[in-house]
Amino acid sequence: MSQRVGAYAVCVDDGRVLLARYVSPFGDGSWWTLPGGGVEQNEDPFDAVTREVAEETGYESVVEELLGVDSRVVPAAVRRRWGRGDHQNLGIFYAVRVTGGSTRPEPNGETAESAWTPIADVPGLHRAALVDVGIALWESRPRTGRVAPIAVGGLVEH
């Protein structure tokens, strides 16, 4: 089974959440997600999340709070790339505040744009399940750092 550790930013300001539109390099579409991504070898997730926000959105940011951790196994049958076996995705979610910069696409990357989106509009978006997980963690701030599993088909629900 493959495994990936990612650090994700939940940036909320005035009822809006910062989202990034990911464009698949495999030509199988695009969807909205939280700024964030894979933690590099020997990198602390705390540092990874602010690096990812800067790379994907152009914003400078600071971590304000660890919200929680989400662990899910994506069965091989619903993975976007067939023949790779089951995959465990371990996501570490932080409440992050933007401190400067301005929005821009990711240079030479897979993030086409970022946008401040009203939280009430999120259910109507084609999005990664981790958006729902991050917002649920932000809204509930569970003492355990865990919310009830969000039912998804693969990594993209809607």
Image (cartoon, rainbow, N blue to C red):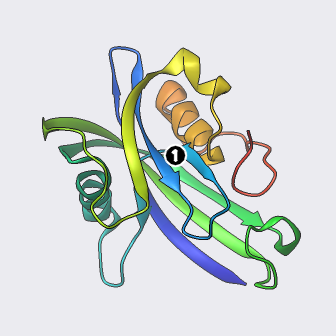
Judge left or right: residue 113 versus residue 104: right
Looking at the image, which residue sits at the far right? 77
- Secondary structure beneath label 1: strand
Residue 54 position (above or below residue 121): below
- Residue at image position (19%, 44%) is 61
Local crowd at mark 1 within 10 Å, few (<14), some, or many (≥20)?
many
Tell me the residue that label 1 is attached to.
33
**Residue 10 visible at all:** no
Count of numbered labels shown in the rendering: 1
Going by the numbered disc 1, the residue's amino acid type is Thr
Task: Please state if 90 lies on the left or on the right of 101 as rendered.
Answer: right
Residue 78 in view of the camera: yes
Image location of residue 75, percent across then percent down:
83, 69
| Residue in view at x 78 percent, y 47 percent | 152
Give the residue at x 58% y 32%: 136
Along the viewing direction, whichever of 103 and 7 lies nearer the viewer: 103
Name the quadrant of the N terminus.
bottom right
Quadrant of res 88: bottom right
Please state the horizontal and vertical placement of residue 133, each as a whole percent of the image.
60, 41
Is 114 located above or below residue 51 in the figure?
A: above
Residue 95: x percent and y percent? Answer: 35, 39
Q: Is residue 140 above or below residue 60?
A: above
